[in-house]
Image: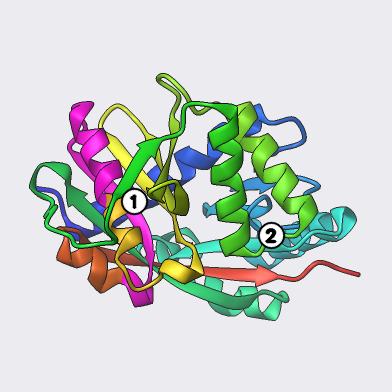
């Protein structure tokens, strides 16, 4: 029988798998070092620099590993994020949150781990008129998708440029694992959503809505379109991390809350 703990692990693993392919981009590395999985780059943003997994190791303290990660981030002059999945962190590294705080990492955000069956999602969603949400199939549309994400996430010019380069390098057409969708009202871009597609799971992410269209269920509708696209590919399982404020919206269309991911961040040195 699949337990809630098992489902939380599936959300966590799917999200990690989506980032593991980022090593196709020059300058992005994934280090399986000191019993940790560390995404690292020279890009000064925590989306490009994060500890994704913390495994136990005999005879080496978590405090030493935290100090090592911080020192390496200081050398690159980048901020560093550390993922703490409450459903796995106590078995991976007991007391990790307190140890991160002592090592200069502050709690930045909490995300709700959620799962759904794409076959039973509720598609009865009202949004802006003439709403469309289509998969990105050209470099021009990929640039538009990247600009939309960069605008909403407030990336600076350097990070926005690297964000586009990353997803060009990873790939986004055909059977590529990463698939992106742009939401439009008429000819106007109003939001977007992405998915990392595996053989049996679609991991939804980067659900964004431009400020002028917030409150019109654009993000929810875009998520539904992504799930419908995955279902047409024969994928029945869906996972995502939702901001706490948006978890109830995803629950209304068929997602279930199964866990929590806390993200801690250590600022870049100046």
Which residue, as the protein is rendered here, is positioned at the far top?
A: 174
Seen at 39% across and 43% down, the residue is 14
Residue 138 on image: x %, y %: 53, 26
Give the number of the mark in front: 2 or 1: 2
| Vertical placement of residue 101 versus 172, above or below | below
Instruction: Say whether residue 57 is visible.
Output: no
Instruction: Say whether residue 8 is visible.
Output: yes
Other-residue count near label 2 (Cα within 10 Å), few / some / many at <14 / 14–19 / ≥20: some
Give the numbered dot on residue 93.
none
Secondary structure at badge 2 equals loop
| CA gap, disc 2 and disc 1 | 26 Å
Q: Which residue is disc 2 drawn over?
A: 155
In the picture, residue 226 is in which quadrant? top left
Q: State yes or no: residue 235 in magenta.
A: yes
Residue 218 on image: x %, y %: 34, 60
Residue 107 on image: x %, y %: 57, 78
144 to the left or right of 71: left
Dot placed on the residue nearer the N-terminal end, 2 or 1: 1
Seen at 74% across and 45% down, the residue is 161
Q: Nearer the viewer, residue 16 or 134?
A: 134
Q: Quadrant of the C terminus?
A: bottom right
Q: Are marks 2 and 1 in contact (CB under 8 Å)?
A: no
Q: Which residue is disc 1 drawn over?
A: 11
**Total marks drawn?**
2
25 to the left or right of 85: right
Other-residue count near label 1 (Cα within 10 Å), few / some / many at <14 / 14–19 / ≥20: many
| Vertical placement of residue 45 versus 165, above or below | below
Q: State yes or no: residue 125 in magenta.
A: no
Q: Nearer the viewer, residue 22 or 120?
A: 120
* Magenta-colored span: 224-246
Residue 260 on image: x %, y %: 36, 68
């Amino acid at each position: 029988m699949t337990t809630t703990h098992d489902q939380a692990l599936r959300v966590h693993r799917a999200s990690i798998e989506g980032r593991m392919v980022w090593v196709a981009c020059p300058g992005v590395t994934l280090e399986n070092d000191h019993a940790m999985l560390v995404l690292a780059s020279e890009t000064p943003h925590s989306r490009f620099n994060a500890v994704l997994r913390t495994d136990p190791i005999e005879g080496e303290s978590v405090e030493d590993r935290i100090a090592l990660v911080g020192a390496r981030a200081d050398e690159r002059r980048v901020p560093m994020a550390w993922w703490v999945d409450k459903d796995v962190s106590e078995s991976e590294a007991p007391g990790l949150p307190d140890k991160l705080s002592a090592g200069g990492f502050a709690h930045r955000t909490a995300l709700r781990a959620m799962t759904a069956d794409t076959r039973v999602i509720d598609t009865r969603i009202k949004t802006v008129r003439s709403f469309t949400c289509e998969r990105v199939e050209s470099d021009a549309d990929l640039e538009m998708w990247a600009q939309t994400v960069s605008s909403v996430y407030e990336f600076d010019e350097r990070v926005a440029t690297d964000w586009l380069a990353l997803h060009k390098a990873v790939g986004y057409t055909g059977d590529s694992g990463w698939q992106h969708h742009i939401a439009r009202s008429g000819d106007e871009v109003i939001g977007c959503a992405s998915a990392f597609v595996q053989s049996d799971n679609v991991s939804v992410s980067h659900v964004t809505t431009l400020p002028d269209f917030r409150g019109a269920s654009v993000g929810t509708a875009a998520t539904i379109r992504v799930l419908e696209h995955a279902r047409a590919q024969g994928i029945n399982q869906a996972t995502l991390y939702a901001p706490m404020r948006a978890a109830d919206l995803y629950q209304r269309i068929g997602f279930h809350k199964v866990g929590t991911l806390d993200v801690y961040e250590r600022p870049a040195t100046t």
